[in-house]
């Protein structure tokens, strides 16, 4: 099942600061509400582990994120594949 998150929103922070945060998984991953851990891989991708659950079924999801498109300070687009 594929998920697509897109859209626009406004924050009261300089674009450079927002881009600096969102373009580095080691900076934004720990801010995720269900964050468990992350690993930076030699190929430039990142594995992010988060707690997941539906009803009484609980576990850990692992998502491999690759920064596919980067245009500082305008755009940071990730592609992810999860387990």
Image (tube, helix red, strand yellow):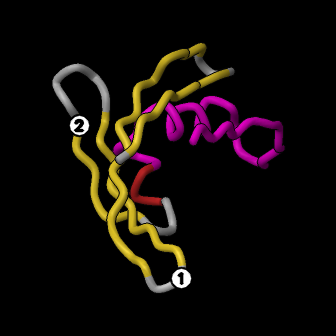
Is the residue marked by circle 1 packed among few (<14), some (14-19), or many (20+) residues within 10 Å?
Answer: few
Marks 2 and 1: which is nearer the front?
1
| Image vertical order of residue 50 relative to residue 53, above or below | above
On screen, residue 9 versus residue 15, left or right, reads right
Residue 41 position in % (x across, y down): 20, 31
Disc 1 designates what residue? 55
> Distance from label 2 to label 1 (Cα)?
31 Å
Nearer-the-camera pick, 56 or 5: 56
- Residue 40: image tag: 2
Residue located 34% across and 70% down the image:
59
Circle 1: element type: loop
Magenta residues, start to end: 1-28
Residue located 42% across and 78% down the image:
57
Residue located 45% across and 34% down the image:
80
Nearer-the-camera pick, 14 or 83: 83
Q: Earlier in the sequence, mark 2 or mark 1?
A: 2
The quadrant in which the N terminus is found is top right
Residue 37 position in % (x across, y down): 28, 58
């Amino acid at each position: 099942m594929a998920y697509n998150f897109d859209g626009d929103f406004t924050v009261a922070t300089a674009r450079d600061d927002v881009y600096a945060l969102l373009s580095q998984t080691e900076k934004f991953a720990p801010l995720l509400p269900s964050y468990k851990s992350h690993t930076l891989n030699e190929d430039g991708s990142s594995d992010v582990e988060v707690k997941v659950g539906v009803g009484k079924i609980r576990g850990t999801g692992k998502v491999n994120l690759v920064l596919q498109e980067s245009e500082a300070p305008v755009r940071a687009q990730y592609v992810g594949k999860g387990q």
